[in-house]
Image (tube, helix red, strand yellow):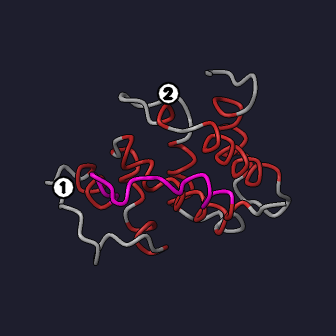
């Protein structure tokens, strides 16, 4: 069986090469500041970057969200035993309805949706996960069959 990381890599192989709005820019918007332009030296997808600029998730447009999604999914899996990650908390909230306008969930392919569900299942049902409640809520509200708001 293919690992979650391999599923993520396969499903998101054709995502945008860079975001139009970075997490750092979203964080600046959250602080009522002018958003900085993308800088590959600063806007790397490292654990430190994610934990510093997690509040920027709310401000991502659909294509920027799609750019970050595979990284956020992998980071969430890596942090499943660490219940202190601000990034994972913000990310799981971003997977709950209502979707943004323009919709972010609507840009996902069927395969990408399956991968999101697989990661949420891992976070919700793994005995070692510290994110069970948050992942189950996202599943119940939108991602699972028969979800409340789907």
The answer to which quarter of the image holds residue 122 is bottom right
Q: How crowded is mark 2: few (under 14 residues within 10 Å), some or many (20 or more)?
A: few
Q: Give the range drawn in magenta.
A: 7-23
Q: Are marks 1 and 2 in contact (CB under 8 Å)?
A: no
Q: Is residue 27 above or below residue 96?
A: below
From the image, tell me which residue sits under label 2: 98
Can you say which quadrant of the picture contains the N terminus?
Answer: bottom right
Q: Is residue 52 magenta?
A: no
The answer to which quarter of the image holds residue 12 is bottom right
| Residue 8: % across, % down | 63, 57
Residue at 37 percent of width and 72 percent of height: 44
Q: Which residue is at the far left?
A: 34
Q: Residues within 10 Å of mark 1 (few under 14, many from 20)?
A: some
Q: In this view, does 12 lie above or below 135?
A: below
From the image, tell me which residue sits under label 1: 35
Is 123 on the left-hand or right-hand side of 27? right
Q: Is mark 1 on a helix, strand or loop?
A: loop
């Amino acid at each position: 069986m293919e690992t979650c990381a391999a599923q993520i890599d396969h499903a998101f192989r054709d995502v945008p090469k860079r975001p139009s709005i970075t997490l750092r820019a979203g964080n600046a918007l959250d602080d009522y500041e002018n958003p900085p332009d993308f800088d590959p030296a600063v806007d790397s997808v490292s654990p430190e970057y994610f934990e510093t600029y997690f509040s920027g998730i709310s401000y991502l447009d659909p294509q920027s969200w799609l750019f970050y999604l595979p990284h956020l999914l992998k980071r969430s899996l890596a942090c499943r035993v660490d219940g202190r990650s601000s990034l994972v908390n913000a990310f799981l909230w971003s997977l709950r309805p209502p979707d943004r306008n323009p919709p972010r969930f609507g840009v996902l392919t069927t395969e990408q949706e399956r991968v999101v569900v697989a990661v949420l299942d891992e976070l919700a049902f793994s005995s070692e996960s510290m994110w069970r409640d948050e992942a189950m809520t996202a599943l119940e509200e939108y991602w699972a069959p028969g979800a409340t708001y789907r």
